[in-house]
Amino acid sequence: MTEAIAIKDLSRYYNNFLALDNLYLKVKRNEDVALVGPNGAGKTTALKILCGLLRPSSGTAYINGVNVIEERERALSEVGAIVETPEFYPFLTPNETLSYLGRLRGMDGHELKSRINEVLKLVKLDEWADIRIEKFSRGMKQRLALAQAMLHDPPILILDEPTLGLDPRGMVEMREVLKKARKEKTVFFASHLLAEVTKVCDKVALIDHGRLLVYDSIARLKRKYRTSLEGVYLKLTEEAI
Amino acid sequence: MNAEFEKLKIVSKYELLKQFRRKRFYGALVITIFAQILMIALYKGLDLPRQMGIPDKPELFAIFITSMGTIAILGAVFFAGDAIASEFEHKTGYLLFVNPVKRITLVVGKYIACFIATAVILILAYMISAVALLGFYRQIPSGILGSLAIALMLACCVLSMAFVYSSLLKGSMGATIATLLTFMLIIPIIQAGLSYAGYEPWFMPEYAGDAVASTYGISLQQAFGGMFGGGPMGRMARMMRTPDPTLSFLVLSGYAVILFQLSIWMAKRREML
């Protein structure tokens, strides 16, 4: 079976700084995997390469068996993504923004309209559908980012710190959305909020200094190291220093 | 191919919507209308033909009020300076570039939108000129169409240059200033140097852009020669050459195409760091 996401020996340099060091990771279909690690571990770099925003120095990545580096557009058609903290065009409304992005993904007419209403309701922005985004708070933009990622109902979600900027209620709601999504989608998300990770994912990939330290289910890691996920994280990242 | 063309139409449409929602578009409209009215008022109010000692005729009036080179440059720079750079600077690229759309489609779509926005400004300026010509002389010289065509091609040339800077530089402001400096300082300095050395700078975009005023059958030397009296400015005006409209159009097209290709190549290579 083709993996939903396959990262094969990915390395990426920023000038002389090695951000990713031969990262190798596979995510099966319908798995939910959190990519965790300290700041600067290489999480966002890995996600950016997966989303075709960066080129690797070496190695490659596949989405549903399609090489992201060689066939970027075809690979991305299967993906909904939030990378870093995306900004929106301030002069457009959520309706217009989602209409723009939906059309770029081949959606149109009634299907697009009803799907926009659906995702805006899902992220609780339906009352703001026709207000220009320049008036939106950080948290509202993050909700809209999730709406655009879910718009075309992609089989794979790639999310970078999806709860960033959300208030506690927003975090709970985002978690609920992700829990619902994980039943039928592959969710691969980067975070350093371990409490959040345990509530949403079954598996974690811990990276530091661009290298994969461990990749296993949370339950197995807890059993193996006889401690919480936080304990595992502290132990392994300390060893890596 | 067909799907990509559909995407191009979508990108152009929404980029144009963005342009029309911005205050700078309406600012450019107001400045254009004001500049046109001012030019007409100056020509008529100061009775320029009499001061220059040449007979007044619609072609001369058209030369003065349809010298849209500056409007084309400013309009294009205003709309295009941030076209690509802002996607990186304001992080909207994280939203746009993760879609299954080729980078070339995005750049071409943006270019079309910027061109339409600039063209709206230019066409409005020419329409004001045409109305004034009809009002004062009851005729519109046919050269006005050639002048508009060259002004639009000059706008394309400036847009392409702005896209190059916008693909290259980190910030929108830097790209805007760099384009302005290139067209209003660097190129004119090179052009002036060539003119003083006795070469006709037909291959310089600024000189080719001056052809917006040379489609009416009056040489620029005739039109502007008597304007500045006998001082150094007067001597300079009398040295003025009249660019050939067809050659100038081709030169501007060449710059527009080559610079635009360069901007596409650079935009394709640029990463969201």
Image (cartoon, coloured by chain):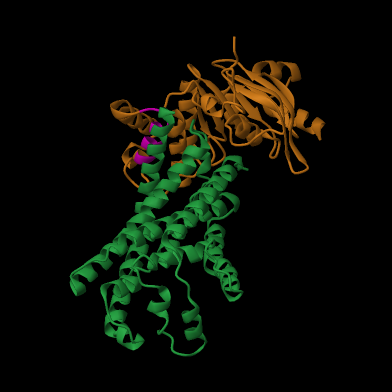
Chain colours: A orange, B green
Relative to B54, say whether B158 is above or below: above
Q: How far from the left and from the top, in percent, is residue A4? A: 57, 18
Q: How far from the left and from the top, in percent, is residue B34? A: 32, 71
Which quadrant would the N terminus of chain A be assigned to in this image?
A: top right
Is residue A99 among the parts visible in the rendering?
yes
Q: Is residue B131 left or right of residue B151?
A: left
Q: Quadrant of residue A8?
A: top right
Q: How far from the left and from the top, in percent, is residue B32? A: 34, 67
Q: Residue furthest top?
A: A1
Q: Nearer the viewer, residue B185 or A205?
A: B185
Magenta: main secondary structure: helix
Q: Is residue B71 left or right of residue B143?
A: right
Magenta segment boundaries in residue numbering = A96-107
Is residue A89 among the parts visible in the rendering?
no
Q: How far from the left and from the top, in percent, is residue B216? A: 33, 67
Residue at 52%, 68% in the rendered image: B184
